[in-house]
Amino acid sequence: MAWGRKKGGARKEPLFGLPAALADLRLSPSDRVPGGGDDTPAKSKPKSSDSGSEKPRPSRSGSKRRSKSRGFGIGRLFYWTAVLGLWAGIAVIGVVVWVGAHLPPIQSLEIPKRPPTIQIVGIDGSVLAQRGEMAGANIALKDLPPYLPKAFIAIEDRRFYSHFGVDPLGILRAAITNVLHRGVSQGGSTLTQQLAKNLFLTQERTMQRKLQEAELALWLERKHSKNEILELYLNRVYFGSGAYGVEAAAQRYFGKSAKNVTLPEAAMLAGLVKSPSRLAPNRNPEGAEQRAQVVLAAMADAKFITGAQAKASIGQPSIAVKPAGAGTVNYVADWIGEVLDDLVGQIDQDIVVQTTIDPKLQNVAEAAVIDELAAKSVKFNVSQGALVAMTPDGAVRAMVGGRNYAESQYNRAVTAKRQPGSSFKPFVYLTAVEAGLTPDTIRTDAPLDIKGWKPENYTHEYFGSVTLTQALAMSLNTVAVRLGVEVGAKNVVRTAHRLGISSKLEPNVSIALGTSEVSVLELVGAYAPFANGGYAVSPHVVTKIRTSSGKLLYDRPTEPPNQVIEPRYDAMMNSMMRETLISGTARKAEIPGWTAAGKTGTSQDYRDAWFIGYTAKLVTGVWLGNDDNSPTKKATGGGLPVEVWTRFMKAAHQGVPVAAIPNSQGSWAPANLMQISSQISAPSAPAAPMQIQPPMQAPPSAPVPSGGGYYRQPPPTPARAAAPPNPNARPEAAAGLDGWLADRLFR
């Protein structure tokens, strides 16, 4: 190669760039390729192996490779650690963003108001029941004894004042404990997390909810101080038996304010948070006491109390636990809850509801129903009962919707509808007397044939010519059906609706025997006009509603009088129904010194047994039967219902000045049924069916009565409605004197 050669005599030109850089480059002989100037490469000769030749220097390439390999491994470790850390950070940020996106809107993340408390008081001002999730008022942290909040901190979150809303050490400790115990034996949630869950989240156990709980806990810690969070927690946590907050729990379990609880009581309250339903002292006093001992030990371990204090508190308190609200007055409370929205609209503050309920009468009614059923429910195969007692102006004084509220909250006094049987007959007889008949009117008690339907009396005996008073007192079914056809089924329905029945009634020939279903409350309310002189009433239980601060929200208005029965007709009905208690189907019903009237009822196959009776002070109805509508063992209206009614009414009238039923005395009032029994035709065996008398014809101008009026002229001839039952059905056992025909009616 000739880059480095000089040629003599030649002119030197300046060199730039690469030539300039290579101008001074010189090759030594050893650098040249053997073979002279030939550009063709030659094969190298093997090196001499003479001993005198120079030995090669040892190579360092192996050690360098090992050093480079070690450096490369550490570098790669740092590199991948950084990469994984970066992706982990991105993943955490993504999870936080995703969880935050599923939180409630930020504008709604404010401390919600606690649900309102509904306090229900009786006519004497005593508290009957409470409704609402938060039964206790908020109480300031400074007003509580210092050991009460410390008890919660000791057992639930000992590092409460040192963590930032989430306690990593607590979570780690809980995880280790759970692994060792092979199950969930300890939780890692802080008090702040528990508060976040109670305020904003549901109780579901999912990872998403736990992550949301953690985020909200951090938000709460940023927005509120530790003491504010602790105070919110104590006023919102659930303690079982419907008690939310320490004040409600202290009142529920110890009958005192949370300001006055003792150290053992504070420990018991703190112990309930773990499992309020299982450890509630009114349900599990032993479990609650054992848990309280655990709390006391935790308080001593945290140096909140001394060991001597913890030891002295074991076995205390002597729990004055209030019984769980399972009394029948809760049926009243539920009914009130249903009508509040109509009275005051949506409730957003604590209110006090003043009612017409008399606590003493409520207790008497409850005992009468429960005790009688306990003694005779097996004998008569009767599992349930209901009772409603109201004043003649419609104010409900007592209500029993079932024998055990804890087992069944279904209100059989208000919600359930059953066939009233012969207790519906007064509406038939009232329609008849308004059409021109009187209690002394004679009708024939004999077999009937209505297009193949042959209603019969209970005993298959017939008394021939009887007065309406005698027929109603003895509950003769054939006479009632005859009157229903005579005055018209539609007019009977109008009469019942006018007096207060609100349920749909079928205007067919069987209506005279009470085959359309009604509730106890509406039937008792429809009897009230008989007891008050003929005026319509609206059964009611609420008189006033106030806020907890005393502001009046509702005051029941005085209803204008609406006379639905003329006094003379009311007097006739009272006279006839008095005879039912004197010599008829309700002879067992008596109230010494008082004039009373009423009517029994028994439905098909003894499924329902009724008695509605009244004095000048109270109108009371009793129903007994089974929820599944199964037959009883021959329980009739004149039996067990009359016994329950008599027990209640005797107690309710003790010490009350005697008063007569309005319009109960009339110059036409008949003598006692037993005294005139000789005038009745002797019972006879069933004869050939007698065709019914043609219905009374009304003049063309006869007015059709409206809901608030009463009949002044005979009603028009009714049209036949429902078809009669199959007369060829196999007859069953009789269902009582006042319900026998209904047995055949539904076969």
Image: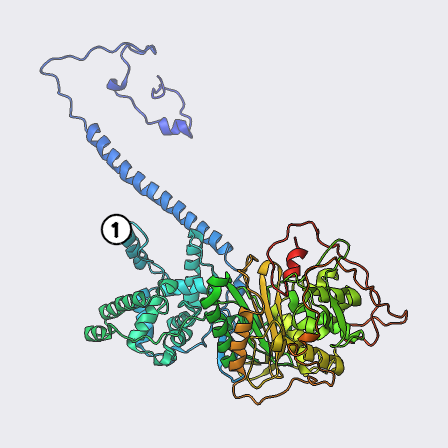
Mark 1, Cα crowd under 10 Å, few <14 / some 14-19 / many 20+, is few
Name the one closer to the observer, 598 or 709.
598
Q: Residue furthest right?
A: 700
Q: Residue at x 68, y 75 (%)?
A: 678
User: In the rendered image of this protein, does residue 271 appear above or below residue 592?
Assistant: above
Name the one closer to the observer, 145 or 322.
322
Q: Position of residue 604 (x, y in %)?
A: 62, 59
Name the one closer to the observer, 554 or 230.
554
Q: Quadrant of residue 420?
A: bottom right
Disc 1 element: helix
Can you identify the residue that label 1 sits on?
Answer: 180
Q: Position of residue 90 (x, y in %)?
A: 43, 48
Q: Position of residue 16 (x, y in %)?
A: 42, 30
With 588 as the anchor, is 78 left or right in this view?
left
Q: Quadrant of residue 173?
A: bottom left
Q: Position of residue 475 (x, y in %)?
A: 66, 69
